[in-house]
Amino acid sequence: MRGSALWLRNEIERKTATAIKMEQEAADFELLMTADGVQSQSNGEDPPDRLWARATKTAKQLRAEINLLKRELATQEKQATQVDPRQANRERIAQLKGMRQ
């Protein structure tokens, strides 16, 4: 279910893999730019500098989304482990009532 802890973990894993791929592509384009220099657009293809910029921007956006998902997951896990004091008191009262009978 969207927004559940399992879904958040899967999204984090999927986006992390994609971000790593984009970072690797950016590094490859950077090497190409270093070797060949910045090239002008020809034959309808994007030059390495534009491809590098696009890959870098996408990787940064993915990393930002991953951080948001991690914060949301941490909040959910924290809320799941917190005990409602009123519920704990009710359970303790019920336990004590059971002991008196």
Image (cartoon, rainbow, N blue to C red):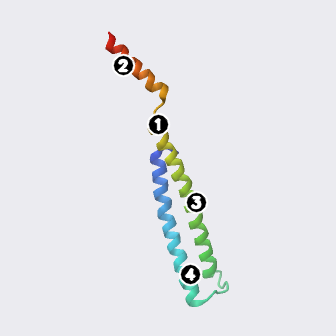
The label on residue 82 is 1
Of tags 4 and 1, the one toward the viewer is 1
> Is residue 72 rendered to the left or right of residue 89?
right
The label on residue 71 is none
Compared to 89, does 63 lie above or below? below
Residue kind at label 1, given as amino acid type: Gln
Q: Which quadrant would residue 99 be assigned to in this image?
A: top left
Compared to 48, does 6 lie above or below? above
Q: Quadrant of the C terminus?
A: top left
- What separation in Å lies between label 2 and label 4 (alpha carbons)? 67 Å
- What separation in Å lies between label 1 and label 3 (alpha carbons)? 27 Å
Of callouts 2 and 4, the N-terminal one = 4
Q: Which residue is mark 3?
A: 64
Of tags 3 and 2, the one toward the viewer is 2
Of callouts 3 and 4, the N-terminal one = 4
Residue kind at label 4, given as amino acid type: Glu
Q: Is residue 8 visible?
A: yes
Residue displayed at 41% across by 18% down = 93
Compared to 82, does 88 lie above or below? above
- What separation in Å lies between label 3 and label 2 (alpha carbons)? 47 Å
Q: Confirm or deny contact between disc 4 and disc 1 (CB under 8 A).
A: no
Q: Which residue is mark 2?
A: 95
Q: Confirm or deny contact between disc 2 and disc 1 (CB under 8 A).
A: no
Of callouts 2 and 1, the N-terminal one = 1
Residue displayed at 57% across by 57% down = 65
